[in-house]
Image (spheres, rainbow, N blue to C red):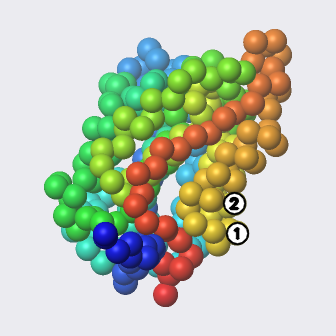
Amino acid sequence: SAVKMPRAFEPYKKHKNMGKCLIISNDCFSFFSPGSPHLCRKGCSVDENFLSNTFKSLGKVQYDVISSILDVLLYNSCFVCVLMSHGEEGTILGSDERWMPVKTLTSLMTSDLCPSLRDKPKLFFLQACRGLEYDPGVEADSVEAPGEFFGISDVPEADFLCCYSTVEGLHCSVFIHELCEMLKDCHLEIIQIMTRVNHCVANHFQSYTTDPDTHRKRQMPCFASILTKDFYLHTAID
């Protein structure tokens, strides 16, 4: 009979730098289409500053907004990408007003296309509003009975984590705020952190509008993980 060997679960290996954070925030789309001012996302700079300050505070984090990154990932422990724009199921709107599948973006970081990230955690945080009626950062969101979640299809291979501000509904920056607060103050494993973010957003916030259809609604974040090891942001810092 086969001898059952004890299992050893080790966290992801840490490298010289904690990681690379790329923040993509589409706030204005009228440059390409002057007739679509309703697409503009007001107040995005608040989320951008909160995110950049948070990841800088974590230690040896290299922060960029749209820059060349693939040549410097070899000595980093992880890759983080934050995408903020308008969105639909499985897609995100570019500043040129063209819809891009989320999986097309996440697949750029696979081990085949980016060998320096092989066996390293790739974290994607998506804040994409599902409606155009409200400005970001104002209305909390979500229908009361969200439909089936297909986010797992956005994860191309192992060692990926995709986190979403909401399953359905409108957009708000409560998700980004709670995410940053947890990342700065919490020394738990990343999945535990995201579970706490879900709890705080879902239970502590609700919308306040003049529309009965959107008043007193709650936002429900979610995440899809194919991480194969534990990942601790704080212990990745020397």
Q: Give SS at disc 1.
A: helix
Q: Give SS at disc 2.
A: helix
- Front residue of 162 and 84: 162
The total of numbered circles placed on residues is: 2
Location of residue 29 in the rendering, given as x and y in whole percent from the top left corner: 43, 28
Q: Residue furthest front?
A: 1
Location of residue 238 in the rendering, given as x and y in whole percent from the top left corner: 49, 87
Whether residue 20 is visible to the viewer of this picture, yes or no, is no
Residue 33 to residue 159: above or below: above
Give the residue displayed 36% in from the left and 58% down from the top. Answer: 159
Q: Amino acid at mark 2?
A: Glu
Disc number for residue 107: none
Give the residue displayed 62% in from the left and 23% down from the top. Answer: 146
- Front residue of 29 and 233: 233
Q: Residues within 10 Å of mark 1 (few under 14, many from 20)?
A: few
Cβ–Cβ below 8 Å for labels 1 and 2? yes
Residue 37 to residue 165: above or below: above
Residue denoted by label 2: 181
Residue 209 to residue 80: above or below: above
> Label 1 to label 2, Cα distance in Å?
6 Å
Image quadrant occupied by the N terminus: bottom left
Q: Using residue 7 as the reference point, say whether residue 199 is left or right of it.
A: right
Location of residue 31 in the rendering, given as x and y in whole percent from the top left corner: 39, 29
Q: Residue furthest bottom?
A: 238
Location of residue 35 in the rendering, given as x and y in whole percent from the top left corner: 44, 14
Give the residue displayed 70% in from the left and 69% down from the top. Answer: 185
Q: Amino acid at mark 1?
A: Asp
Give the residue displayed 81% in from the left and 12% down from the top. Answer: 212
Q: Residue furthest top?
A: 212
Q: Residues within 10 Å of mark 2 (few under 14, many from 20)?
A: some
Disc number for residue 185: 1
Whether residue 52 is visible to the viewer of this picture, yes or no, is yes
